[in-house]
Image (cartoon, grey):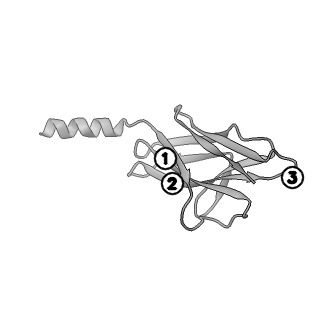
């Protein structure tokens, strides 16, 4: 029994990064414009690991932002996962320019190769 518990701890500590994206529900973390598309970005991985996330494949004239209750970080963010190995961000796609394409999606990529596709938003 003890060996099974030890094996489970080893497997859990080596857990690969997993990113998921879904529509944002509930109260916004920070004040945002109504033209902002909001998503819930869930980051799961090794507890206490530091990850570097970047928004890629964002259309010209759009901005991808990683938001917490205190700040939004444009295009990239450094994440130190808590002991739970779980963090949640409000990921936003913001159309910044009037002549920008009507739609943009994104890909959120971790420095360890994990990624998730963000559905196209229109604003």
Mark 2, other Cα within 10 Å: few <14 / some 14–19 / many ≥20? some
Lower sequence index among marks 2 and 1? 1
Extreme-right residue of the structure: 99
Q: Position of residue 33 (x, y in %)?
A: 73, 64
Lower sequence index among marks 2 and 3? 2
Residue at the disc numbered 1? 43
Q: Distance between the residues labelled 3 and 1?
A: 32 Å
- Mark 2 and mark 3 residues within 8 Å of each other at the beta carbon: no
Give the residue displayed 72% in from the left and 44% down from the top. Answer: 104
Q: Say left or right for 20 vs 62.
A: left
Q: Where is residue 16 in the image (x, y as percent from the top left)?
A: 42, 35
Q: How many labels does the image show?
A: 3
What is the secondary structure assignment of the residue under circle 3?
loop
Q: Nearer the viewer, mark 2 or mark 3?
A: 3
Mark 1, other Cα within 10 Å: few <14 / some 14–19 / many ≥20? many
Lower sequence index among marks 3 and 1? 1
122 and 79: which is toward the camera? 122
Residue at the disc numbered 3? 98
Give the residue displayed 27% in from the left and 40% down from the top. Answer: 9
What is the secondary structure assignment of the residue under circle 1?
strand
Q: Say left or right for 60 vs 18.
A: right
What is the secondary structure assignment of the residue under circle 2?
strand
Q: How far apart are marks 2 and 1 (CA)?
A: 6 Å
Q: Quadrant of the N terminus?
A: top left
Q: Where is residue 84 in the image (x, y as percent from the top left)?
A: 38, 52
Residue at the disc numbered 2? 88
Q: Position of residue 6 (x, y in %)?
A: 21, 38
- Mark 2 and mark 1 residues within 8 Å of each other at the beta carbon: yes
Q: Distance between the residues labelled 2 and 3?
A: 30 Å
């Amino acid at each position: 029994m003890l060996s099974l518990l030890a094996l489970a701890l080893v497997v859990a500590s080596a857990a690969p990064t997993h990113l998921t994206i879904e529509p944002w529900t509930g109260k916004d973390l920070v004040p945002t414009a109504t033209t902002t598309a909001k998503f819930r970005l869930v980051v799961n991985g090794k507890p206490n690991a530091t990850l570097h996330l970047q928004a890629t494949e964002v259309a010209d004239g759009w901005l991808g932002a990683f938001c917490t209750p205190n700040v939004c970080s444009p295009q990239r963010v450094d994440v130190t996962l808590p002991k739970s190995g779980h963090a949640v961000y409000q990921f936003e796609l913001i159309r910044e320019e009037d002549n920008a394409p009507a739609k943009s999606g994104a890909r959120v990529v971790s420095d360890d190769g994990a990624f998730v596709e963000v559905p196209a938003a229109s604003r």
